[in-house]
Amino acid sequence: MSLTKVIAIAGKPGLYEILGQTKGGFITTSLLDGKKSPVKNTQNVSVLSDIGIYTYETEVPLGQVFLAIHEKFEGKEGLSHKAPNNELTALFSEVLPEYDEERVYVSNIKKVVQWYNILVNANFDFESIKEDLKKLEEAQNEA
């Protein structure tokens, strides 16, 4: 599983892995409880590999932020997304010191921390993020 196969669905809790495509959408499995469900093309979904976090200079891919959090917590579950706001912002300042505090809200940080913990509990291979980031960098260099 890589971040290119993991999605967040608007209005639904947790993260989902794309298993396959159907005529009008795709089949997913929840990373929280393992239940399979169809997702229609009309539903609003976000692929985690396409998400970026604003910094003062540019956008940093979400995978890079996950890797920094993963390194900080040595591969274990991190801070709870229900932790006090000042603890969450302190964590983000540590893993991504140049994040744009005006455009990255505490609600965004909570979601990133919650998603990280879901991925850890689902035994996600964080090494796959390094491969995805390398491919992205190569594609950008060719353009």
Image: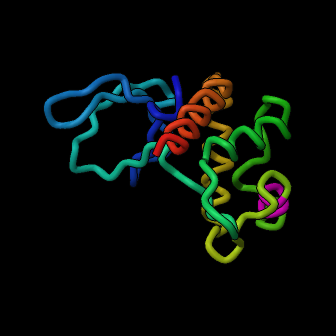
> Does the segment drawn in magenta span residue 113?
no
Q: How many marks?
A: 0
Q: Which residue is found at the position 47% from the left and 24% from the top?
A: 34
Q: Which residues are magenta?
A: 88-93
Q: Is residue 13 left or right of residue 23?
A: right
Residue extending farthest front: 142
The residue that appears at 64% across and 23% down in the rendered structure is 125
Return the x and y of residue 13 as percentages of the image width and height. 48, 46
Q: Residue 48: percent from the left, percent from the top?
A: 50, 43
Residue 66 in the image: state x and y as whole percent.
68, 41
| 92 lies left or right of 109 | right
Residue 77 as seen in the image, left or right of residue 141: right
Outermost residue toward the bottom in this view: 102
- Front-lying residue, 142 or 7: 142
Which residue is at the front of the view, 143 or 121?
Answer: 143
Q: Position of residue 19 (x, y in %)?
A: 36, 23
